[in-house]
Amino acid sequence: MREQSETELKAELEQAHQALFNLRFQTSTRQLADNSQIAKTRKRIARIKTLLAQGQAVQSGK
């Protein structure tokens, strides 16, 4: 993930948010068999946001 550009990371972040929405929807309709997928997706979102923040800090000269 670290090698990806900011644009690619933002696209992946959008996909992860959509996946999280779908997982939550599946949970509400009792179709989700593996509830740990929600936590894994949330952690993936956090990792992407961290990488984006680090990239912005480097660009701003911090």
Image: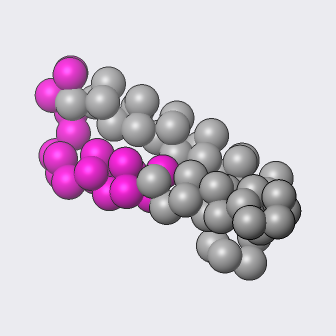
Left or right: where does residue 24 sit relative to residue 50?
Answer: left
Front residue of 48 and 55: 55
In the orientation shown, which residue stands out farthest toward the bottom?
3
Front residue of 17 and 55: 55
**Quarter the C terminus occupies:** bottom right
User: Is residue 48 visible in the rendered structure shown here?
Assistant: no
Front residue of 41 and 55: 55
Residue at 32%, 57% in the rendered image: 40
SS assignment for the magenta stretch, majority: helix
Residue at 52%, 46% in the rendered image: 16
Q: Residue 8, relative to residue 1: is it above or below?
A: above
Front residue of 31 and 22: 22
Residue at 21%, 39% in the rendered image: 32
Report if residue 32 lies within the magenta region. Answer: yes
Residue 14, located in which quarter of the rendered image?
top right
Q: Position of residue 56 (x, y in %)?
A: 75, 57
Specify the segment rendered in magenta.
28-45
In the orientation shown, which residue stands out farthest toward the front?
62
Residue at 67%, 56% in the rendered image: 52
Q: Position of residue 57 (x, y in %)?
A: 72, 61
**Quarter the N terminus occupies:** bottom right
Q: Position of residue 48 (x, y in %)?
A: 57, 58
The total number of labels drawn is: 0
User: Is residue 7 visible in the rendered structure shown here?
Assistant: yes
The colour scheme used here is one colour
Report if residue 13 lies within the magenta region. Answer: no
Left or right: where does residue 56 sit relative to residue 23?
Answer: right
